[in-house]
Amino acid sequence: MLNKYPVWKYLLLLFIVAAGFLYALPNLYGEDPAVQISATRGGDVDVAQLEQVKQALQQNGIEYQSLAIENNQIQARFKDTESQLEARDIAMQALGSDFIVALNLMPAQPQWLEDLGGSPMKLGLDLRGGVHFLMEVDMSVAMQKKQEEIQADFKTSLREEGLRYRNLLPFGNGVKVSFRNAEETQKAEDYLSKNFRELTIAQSNEDSNTITATLSDARVQEVKEYALQQNITIIRNRVNQLGVAEPLVMRQGAERIVVELPGIQDTARAKEILGATATLEFRRVDQDADPASAANGRVPYGSEVYYNRNNNQPVVLKKDVILTGNHITGANASFDEYQRPQVNIDLDAQGGTKMSHFTKDNIGKPMATLFVEYKPTGRKKPDGSIEFEAIKEVINVATIQARLARSFRITGIDSAAEAQNLALLLRAGALIAPIQIVEERTVGPSLGQENIDLGMTAILWGFCLVLAFMILYYRGFGIVANVALAVNLVLIVGVMSMIPGATLTLPGMAGIVLTVGMAVDANVLIFERIREEILDGRGPQQAIHKGYESAFSTIADANITTFIAAVILFAAGTGPIKGFAVTLAIGILTSMFTAILVTRAIVNAAVGGRKVSKLSI
């Protein structure tokens, strides 16, 4: 028969439509304001912390919908955002700094839908569904690192030139070097002026045997600008590691960065990864020092005392840094031969050369891996910026067994989760200067609730007007097209809900309105072709067959060109443009499916396989 589908094709179409309805269903349940609590450094939360939070909420009269441990996190759901915000502050006070407390919006769909993999469509920041962080960069640490870099370069260069100095200390926006006599001072000034042109080098007014090397104001601004831009780049890398769709990372002023994460679910992890300022330093162990004496204050000159993270034992390290995390190009977590967590490190060419030269001359000697993390103290500097404290812990002391190159591993890490976090931070890059999250909030509609209502009204009005037109103009076949149009909208929502990272924004809603019109356009072409075939004297069944067959090539050509344009918009665009491109591309595919296959299946089921004298079209 011309217009009869086999049973398997009906079943396949029914299965696809049913799957679309199923995965669109979670969007009807909405989301609950929630507080999400996780341990720092990938640690575990247990029943003790759960009871602590429960008691704190009850004592303050905060009602919650649910409170449980899920995926190694304490998750508390609330009825409104006011309770959520109060609970966040209470939980932070109750648990202290060893836990990360973050705001979240959690899907409210039933458990059976969640077990099937259903989740609501992620909404952009303009549709109430994301987190906003305002971060502040500590520029004093960036300048301190620049001074340390200058000191290290001066030490190496003067040693290679055979110029002996008495001391080398930080000074202003640079360093100062003291020599034994005027002759060495003059030689050093000539040599350093020739090889360090970015510095202003001159003899000190206070001591003729002392040279000062300072950065100009313009160079200081360049250092700060570089620190800000590099931090922005690294934060973008970290956001990509989190898999967030359509993130916004941009500067605000001279020292602040705005990060907006639409549709984010695990905000506690996002807060930990984005706010962490972690790097590594590889240093030589001072074998001549007595750790116990050093811990009591008798630290040898040129050394520093730190403590091992695992057993809190003192370790005396040389101040000179062999290598920093800035040279790390790759890092991944794994397990060693004893199933203990480790991080495999890859270095750039310069870092590999430094490590190779050091280990070649120090085989059989111990080398320490120092974990450096900057944390806010809660105090403010005179200029109003946040004061940070450097937390430095020895995570590994290993004897150099052979000459190392660009790849090696570090061990001594507490847990596999901490190894994963450390690898992610090192892989994404070490921040040039520490950052502090000075503001965190869930973001409501940035364009206002009125604009969102207008967007939904536009979809509904467009949908209703199209329905009315199709019924009035095409009668029975118009009803078929309207059913397919409703299925098309559900499929768009279902597909958007299924795709990881897909986010609906206001421009995306515009894309949906456009695809509604395009879906009807395809049916108009088909129905008009059926009318033409009937006017040419063909029978109803043959007219239906020729109408769908002849209009297909025209529909395909028009939709393929639009789909290509959507792909180009997605590839070249950013933010709202990408949101529009995603819904447009999905809408094109679903509209072709519904306008051609679904309507044909309904028509075939209604009039195919039987004799009809007239079509309602």
Image (tube, grey):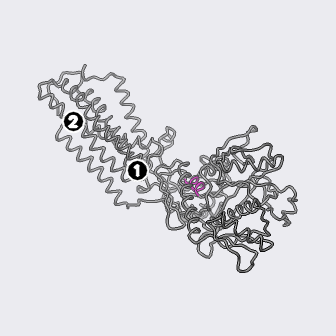
For the point 62% across and 72% down, the residue is 380
Instruction: Report the label total.
Output: 2
Residue most extreme to the bottom: 206
Mark 1 crowdedness (10 Å alpha carbons): few <14, some 14-19, many ≥20 = some
Front residue of 396/485: it is: 396
Classify 13 as above or below 155: above
Magenta highlight range: 267-274
Front residue of 415/171: it is: 171
Which mark, residue 525? Answer: 2
Q: Of circles 2 and 1, which is in front?
A: 1
Residue most extreme to the top: 1
Q: Does residue 46 appear in this view? A: no
Identify the main secondary structure in magenta.
helix
Query: Where does label 1 land, which residue?
Result: 573
For this view, does 281 lie left or right of residue 247? right
Classify 153 as above or below 237: below
Front residue of 322/276: it is: 322
Q: Earlier in the sequence, mark 2 or mark 1?
A: 2
For the point 21% across and 29% down, the residue is 547
- Distance between the alpha carbons at the discs numbered 2 and 1: 32 Å
Query: Identity of the amino acid at label 2?
Result: Leu
Mark 2 crowdedness (10 Å alpha carbons): few <14, some 14-19, many ≥20 = some
Q: Position of residue 578 (x, y in %)?
A: 40, 49
Local SS, label 2: helix
Q: Position of residue 50 (x, y in %)?
A: 64, 54
For the point 47% across and 46% down, the residue is 501
Classify 557 as above or below 324: above
Circles 2 and 1, Cβ within 8 Å, touching? The answer is no
